Image (cartoon, grey):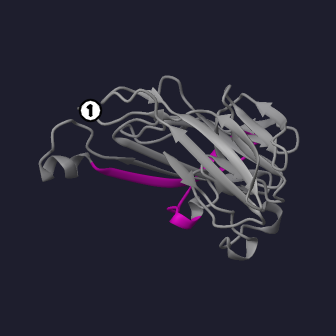
């Protein structure tokens, strides 16, 4: 499976921006480019989050406290990790964008019982974080759909379908989380992983994803490779963390 993400969006066309002191990065699938277009942050093959020099692919730092991205600003890299025993519980961490050092983490945040932050058939989850002062606002959206084998009746399919979303403010000095009385819009996720923008200077990003040994109903890990191009020429490529892949049951 291959996605050519094209050159990423110029600031003039990237949509509404948060406050000047929290300029966001721009996502390229599973990775996010820094606001100054000098660094790209991505899930590392060996685990954790790594910062790579955009021009050369050189590793600038690696942080293994969490392995998923939520957002990037000029000061911070926001990552998150799910609870090992409770798939509906997660934490958000703030890393120093320059050094990769963990600055703070949130209290555990709990989703509805049916929700799951893990990639599994029948459940969806997306997250985005933007800086607000020395803290962050985190947006999340959890979903569920019918995950059985046989085609369900309309009533069963409707009963299995669920959607819930929310926004939370985080103080990374204390870890305190404060739910906000608002529901996120699609625009709130445009700076989180998975979102795509059209152009950024002369850079082009290609993500190649391979699904090995397909077996219906069996969980597996894909192979993800990032290729960075400039002016039509390949600059460098790097294998990133694979994505869990759970096909539907037979």
Residue drawn at 54 percent across, 28 percent down = 83
Q: Does the magenta portion include 179?
A: yes
Residue 61 in view here: yes
Span highlighted in magenta in the image: 161-187
Can you give x and y, in whole percent of width and height, for residue 75 in the image? 83, 51
Residue drawn at 21 percent across, 52 percent down = 158
Q: Assess disc 1: are there few (<14), some (14-19) or many (≥20) residues with their C-alpha within 10 Å of its C-alpha.
A: few
Count of labels shown? 1
Can you give x and y, in whole percent of width and height, for residue 29 in the image? 60, 51
Q: Does the magenta portion include 75?
A: no
Which residue of the protein is positioned furthest toward the top in this rendering? 85
Can you give x and y, in whole percent of width and height, for residue 178 in the image? 61, 50
Which residue of the protein is positioned furthest toward the front in this rendering? 233
Q: Quadrant of residue 24?
A: bottom right
Q: Quadrant of residue 81?
A: top right
Q: Nearer the viewer, residue 18 or 135?
A: 18
Identify the residue under disc 1. Answer: 249
């Amino acid at each position: 499976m291959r996605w050519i993400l094209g050159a990423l969006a110029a600031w003039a066309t990237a949509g509404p921006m948060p406050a000047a002191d929290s300029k966001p990065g721009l996502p390229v699938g599973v990775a996010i480019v820094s606001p100054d277009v000098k660094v790209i942050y991505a899930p590392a093959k060996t685990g954790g989050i790594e910062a790579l020099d955009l021009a050369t692919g050189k590793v600038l730092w690696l942080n293994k406290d969490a392995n998923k991205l939520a957002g990037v600003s000029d000061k911070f890299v926001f990552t998150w990790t799910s609870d090992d025993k409770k798939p509906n519980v997660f934490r958000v961490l703030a890393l120093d964008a320059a050094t990769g050092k963990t600055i703070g983490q949130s209290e555990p945040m709990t989703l509805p019982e049916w929700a799951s932050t893990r990639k599994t058939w029948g459940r969806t989850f997306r997250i985005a974080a933007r800086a607000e002062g020395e803290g962050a606002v985190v947006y999340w959206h959890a979903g569920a759909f019918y995950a059985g084998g046989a085609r369900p009746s309309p009533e069963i399919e409707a009963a299995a379908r669920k959607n819930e979303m929310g926004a939370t403010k985080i103080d990374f000095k204390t870890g305190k989380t404060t739910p906000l009385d608002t529901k996120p819009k699609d625009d709130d996720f445009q700076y989180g992983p998975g979102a795509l923008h059209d152009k950024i200077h002369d850079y082009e990003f290609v993500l190649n994803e391979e699904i090995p040994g397909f077996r219906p109903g069996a969980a597996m890990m894909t192979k993800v490779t990032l290729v960075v191009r400039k002016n039509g020429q390949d600059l460098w490529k790097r294998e990133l963390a694979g994505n869990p892949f759970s096909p539907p049951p037979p």
